[in-house]
Image (cartoon, coloured by chain):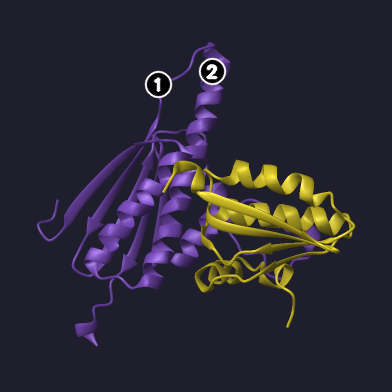
Amino acid sequence: MKHNDKLVLRTENQEGKCTVYVGGELDLESAVQMRAAMSPLIELTDRELVLNLQELRYVDSTGIGILVSVLKARHAKEAPFTVTAVPPHIRKLFDMTGITPFLLKQA
Amino acid sequence: MNENEDLITLKVPAAAEYIDLVRLTLYGLAVKIGFSYEEIEDMKVAVSEACNNAVLHAYGDIRSHAALTGTLAEAPHIEVRFVKRYDALSIIVKDEGTSFDAAAAAKLAQPVDGKTIDELQAGGLGLYLMQALMDDVVVSSEMGTEVVLTKRLIRSGDH
């Protein structure tokens, strides 16, 4: 694996919705890249921001902290933000830290 | 050292780019010992959190040292010791940093249950995750911070 493949981000813009596919490892090392990518997207208040975590293999408290920051920023702008396709071992961390109900759409 | 223990030591620069190397080493050892996939995932996160803290303390020290003396301190390291026993694996993460108050951090370690979005904090989850994911966590701060993370091994033959 190439060093710069550690965190893979792909953005898809549709009508009223911006989906970011987050893959690889989101940790202390890749946090800068994730924050830089999120910062302009947070401002797009005319559409829903969705993070698809299907290909995310690893997240630590730094990564969870970024998700919380994005959540708070979007909430302050009254702009919709959700997280989808969370792999089970990552969902476990979300549940443990108590952020699941804030990030995932209630079924 | 006890003759029933095996010791594996890894020393890496206190930099974020080496934490995945610690994870890889842990993964290899934990598979070899016979931990389950879920237990290994838990340990990977806990060990990384301890290393994250060590890296952040080291950066804090480099900054304060540079501010005081105008020069850069020697590049700090993190020492990770894996102690394999018959019924458990302990991972000891030790840094040389001085900018960490373990007792204060332990008081802050808690989940975000029952809070509103405005009350959520983006930081402070690392120590909480370590405590939640491991069977035992001991943090001590003397000459740097040392975190001892222990996961018990349930052998299938024991049931």
Can residue B91 be seen by looking at this rendering? no
The C terminus of chain B sits in image quarter: bottom left
Tint applied to chain A in the drawing = yellow
Left or right of B106, for residue A3? left
Do the numbered discs 2 and 1 sit on residues whose CB atoms are within 8 Å? no
At horizontal 36% and vertical 42% (from top left) the residue drawn is B94
At horizontal 40% and vertical 41% (from top left) the residue drawn is B18
Q: Label 1 neighbourhood size at 10 Å, few (<14), some (14-19), many (20+)?
A: few
Residue with the mark numbered 2: B66
At horizontal 28% and vertical 43% (from top left) the residue drawn is B10
Spot occupied by residue A27 in the image (x, y as percentages of width and height) = 53, 50
Q: To which chain does the residue with label 2 belong?
A: B
Residue with the mark numbered 1: B74
**Viewer-proximal residue, B77 or B16?**
B16
Spot occupied by residue B55 in the image (x, y as percentages of width and height) = 47, 38
Can residue B21 be seen by looking at this rendering? yes
Tint applied to chain B in the drawing = purple
What's the amino acid at mark 2?
A: Ala
Quadrant of the rendered image containing residue B79: top left
Spot occupied by residue B93 in the image (x, y as percentages of width and height) = 36, 47
